[in-house]
Amino acid sequence: MCGRFNFDISPELLTEIFGISVLEDISPHYNIAPSQRVLIIRRNGTGNLSEFLRWGLIPSWSKDTSSGNSLINARSESVHEKPSFRQAIRYRRCIIPASGYFEWENKNGQKQPYYIRMKDDSLMGLAGIWETWKSAEGEELRTCAILTTSPNRLVQTIHDRMPVILHPEEYNLWLDRNVTDPEKLKPLYQPYPSDLMEMYPVSSLDTEVAVKC
């Protein structure tokens, strides 16, 4: 799962990695929660662009926005079959840049938050999907969800899920809108190598209880 993450990435680094013109209002955010705006990278023609979407996917056929409260994550094992996700995973994939994410260990009735990041402090490219929803009045709302997979050896000590973290060499494949075959995408849904990540406990005063998903 992924119910909270943080973002402290310079516009220059995003431009270097993704070749984008970064939006001017990018600023650090240390506890991004569901329903808030998140920066995503997606393919637009032959190039990439960045934009802010609401976290919590609302399928295009939904009658209202309530589904976004629960669809913050999509399980990679079933994302290609679920009606809520199967069009987005084929045609509307994105990368959600993060500095790290929070996970909670439930032990003896107490929830201890942990912060999980790359050992070398590099960017996490979280595999995401996005969708456009229209209200009856014609208002458009773009939303997104983060894919999850089974945990690596580090994360499994506290939780049974983790986000799908893409390797930099996988970014182009993930964003390629011409790739719609699930068999070409499924190899990307592996747990990220635990020896490249680190995890440490943080104070419960620094964050809030994560949304269960």
Image: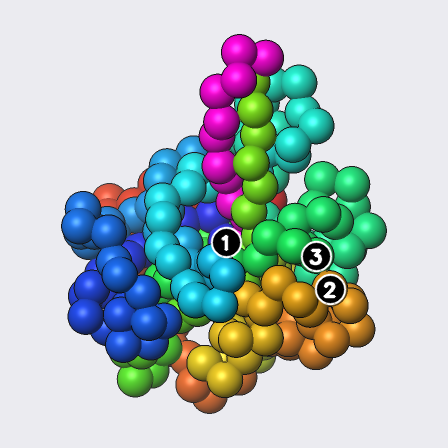
How dense is the environment of label 2, judged by Cα within 10 Å: few (below 14), some, or many (20 and up)? some
212 or 178: which is nearer to us? 178
Answer whether residue 158 is visible to the viewer in this image: no
* Three-letter residue code for mark 2: Thr
Q: Secondary structure at mark 3?
A: helix
Q: Which residues are magenta?
A: 136-146
Q: Which residue is mark 1?
A: 2
- The image's mark for residue 180 is 2
Q: Position of residue 38 (x, y in %)?
A: 37, 47
Label located before the other in sequence (3 or 2): 3
182 or 198: which is nearer to us? 182
Alpha-carbon span between mark 2 and mark 1:
25 Å
Alpha-carbon span between mark 1 and mark 3:
22 Å
Residue drawn at x 37%, y 37% is: 36
Q: Position of residue 119 (x, y in %)?
A: 33, 82
* Three-letter residue code for mark 3: Arg
Q: Quadrant of the N terminus?
A: bottom right
- The image's mark for residue 90 is 3
Alpha-carbon span between mark 3 and mark 2:
5 Å
Residue drawn at x 60%, y 18% is: 64
Single out the mark in the foreground, 1 or 3: 3
Marks 3,2: beta carbons within 8 A: yes
Residue drawn at x 65%, y 71% is: 189
Label located before the other in sequence (1 or 3): 1
Q: Position of residue 100 (x, y in %)?
A: 35, 64
Main secondary structure along the magenta-highlighted residues: strand
Residue drawn at x 70%, y 28% is: 61
Q: Quadrant of the C terminus?
A: top right
The part of the image, by quadrant, that contains residue 163 is: bottom right
As displayed, is residue 5 above or below residue 153? above
